[in-house]
Amino acid sequence: MASGVMAGFTRIGVGAAYYGLKPVLEFMTFNFSMQTRCNKFSEDARGLLKAAIRDPDPVVFLENELLYGESFLVSAEVLDSSFCLPIGKAKIEKEGKDATITAFSKMVGFALKGCLP
């Protein structure tokens, strides 16, 4: 039943976007949306959500419920009201010279813990 309701709201959002509106739909989980084709994914929620709202194209913004309750260091730059991140550009968390590890969502934390100092 819940996935049917989410699918219905998604259809309403798509229809609203088709008519030039900028709908913002929020779902607590994204399991159903992994069945859709997504062009843009996210790591840094605040800056990317602002970019998604400003983007003229439809954007699917996913957040992993496994990250709820996790704590992160937040810089003064992120707290600034003008903070916005570009969509489609990766963030380098830790720069190295011998290997490249790419990850998104919860795996970013695991990748950073596995890197040597």
Image (tube, rainbow, N blue to C red):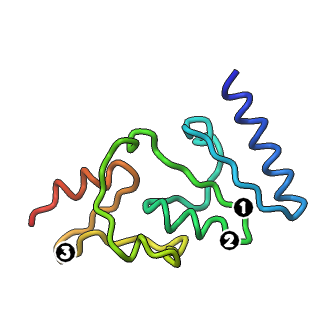
Whether residue 105 sits left or right of residue 82 in the image: it is left
Cα separation between marks 1 and 2 = 7 Å
Whether residue 42 sits left or right of residue 37 in the image: it is left
Cα separation between marks 3 and 1 = 35 Å
Identify the residue at image location x=76%, y=56%: 23
| Quarter of the rendering containing residue 100 | bottom left
Mark 2, residues whose alpha carbon is within 10 Å: few (<14), some, or many (≥20)? few
| Quarter of the rendering containing residue 36 | top right
Mark 1, residues whose alpha carbon is within 10 Å: few (<14), some, or many (≥20)? some
Determine whether label 3 and label 2 are within 8 Å by CB: no
Please give the label number shown on residue 58: 1
User: Is tag 3's residue or tag 1's residue first in the polypeptide sequence?
Assistant: 1
Quadrant containing the N terminus in the rendered view: top right
Where residue 7 sits in the image (x, y, percent)? 73, 36
In the rendered image of this protein, does residue 1 appear above or below residue 29? Answer: above
What amino acid is labelled 2 in the image? Answer: Asp
Pick the front one: 15 or 70:
70
| Residue with the mark numbered 3 | 96
Determine whether label 1 and label 2 are within 8 Å by CB: no
Where residue 22 sits in the image (x, y, percent)? 77, 61
In the rendered image of this protein, does residue 66 appear above or below residue 39? Answer: above
What amino acid is labelled 3 in the image? Answer: Gly
Determine whether label 3 and label 1 are within 8 Å by CB: no
Label 2, secondary structure: give it. Answer: loop
Cα separation between marks 3 and 2 = 32 Å
| Residue with the mark numbered 2 | 55
